[in-house]
Image (cartoon, rainbow, N blue to C red):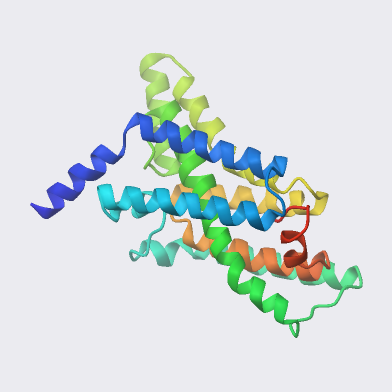
């Protein structure tokens, strides 16, 4: 009976008005971030995180903690274990690239700076937050708009797309799926448009992340590695301190 009640509550959670609200709220968050409406960036970051946390608490109290599962905050096995494989491989390759690029540019690979460790602790939380918005709130809801489904993996989604196209002689479902898949990676790239190297690095990362999300629907490894790699990229490859950016009129990715 408890499982039935939970399933019924989660079914009610998947309603059109909530999907539209979350999608529009995500787009609004991104636009405000890019427009630098609140300065310094730390003010915007704190405000947006608090507002989205309040929304998450409201939804969890209304529909249960299963909401977090649908948003990709999953710790169930073996999903959690498998969802770390691809991001871990990418992270290793990215670390090699960052280190080689750092040395080539004459920058220092330093870990003695306490600010490096502070950002290394904070950034993964911001990374998970960003991935929830990009993957769960943006791409997942876009997929629902085109296909009527938001919980399928990419292979299932494309498989259903081909079936529907054959049955209905229509390309809407198929092209909808194909257009939805890169949406979060494009948004990820745009959010880091303040610098060419940031755009390139996060654009490549975003393409890998979107495929991984569609396979396992888990944002935890994506957000954690986003923070880890982002910290190294800022401090080592670019030779910048993200804390200085957070408290200035510039942006942080």
Q: Residue at x 41, y 28 (%)?
A: 147
Q: Quadrant of residue 21?
A: top left
Q: Position of residue 100 (x, y in %)?
A: 81, 70
Residue sitting at 73 percent across and 70 percent down? 96
Against 191, is 16 above or below?
Answer: above
Report the residue that reaches farthest toward the top.
169
Q: In the image, 149: left or right of 131?
A: left
The answer to whether residue 249 is above or below residue 231 is above
Extreme residue toward the left, this view: 1
Q: Position of residue 137 (x, y in %)?
A: 47, 42
Q: Is residue 222 left or right of residue 12?
A: right
Snapshot quadrant of residue 11 = top left
Q: Decide which of 86, 230 is in the foreground and name it.
A: 230
The image quarter in which residue 16 lies? top left
Residue in view at x 37 percent, y 30 percent: 17
Task: Please determine whether, in this image, residue 125 is positioned above or below residue 61.
Answer: below
Taking 52 as reference, is 231 left or right?
right
């Amino acid at each position: 009976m408890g499982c039935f009640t939970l399933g019924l509550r989660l079914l009610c959670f998947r309603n059109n008005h909530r999907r539209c609200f979350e999608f529009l709220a995500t787009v609004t968050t991104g636009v405000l971030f890019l427009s630098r409406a609140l300065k310094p960036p730390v003010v915007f970051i704190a405000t947006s995180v608090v507002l989205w946390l309040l929304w998450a608490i409201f939804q969890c109290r209304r529909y249960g903690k299963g909401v977090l599962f649908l948003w990709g905050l999953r710790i169930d096995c073996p999903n959690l274990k498998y969802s770390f494989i691809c991001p871990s491989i990418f992270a290793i390759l990215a670390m090699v690239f960052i280190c080689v690029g750092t040395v080539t540019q004459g920058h220092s690979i330093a870990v003695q700076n306490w600010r490096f460790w502070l950002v290394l602790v904070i950034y993964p939380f911001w990374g998970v937050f960003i991935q929830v918005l990009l993957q769960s709130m943006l791409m997942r809801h876009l997929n629902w708009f085109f296909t009527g489904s938001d919980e399928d993996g990419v292979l299932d989604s494309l498989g259903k797309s081909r079936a529907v196209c054959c049955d209905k002689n229509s390309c809407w479902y198929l092209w909808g799926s194909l257009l939805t898949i890169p949406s979060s990676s494009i948004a990820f790239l745009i959010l880091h448009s303040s610098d060419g190297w940031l755009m390139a690095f996060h654009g490549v990362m975003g393409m890998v992340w979107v495929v991984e999300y569609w396979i396992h629907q888990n944002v935890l490894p994506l957000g954690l590695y986003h923070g880890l790699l982002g910290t190294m990229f800022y401090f080592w490859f670019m030779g910048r301190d993200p804390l200085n950016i957070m408290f200035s009129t510039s942006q942080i990715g």
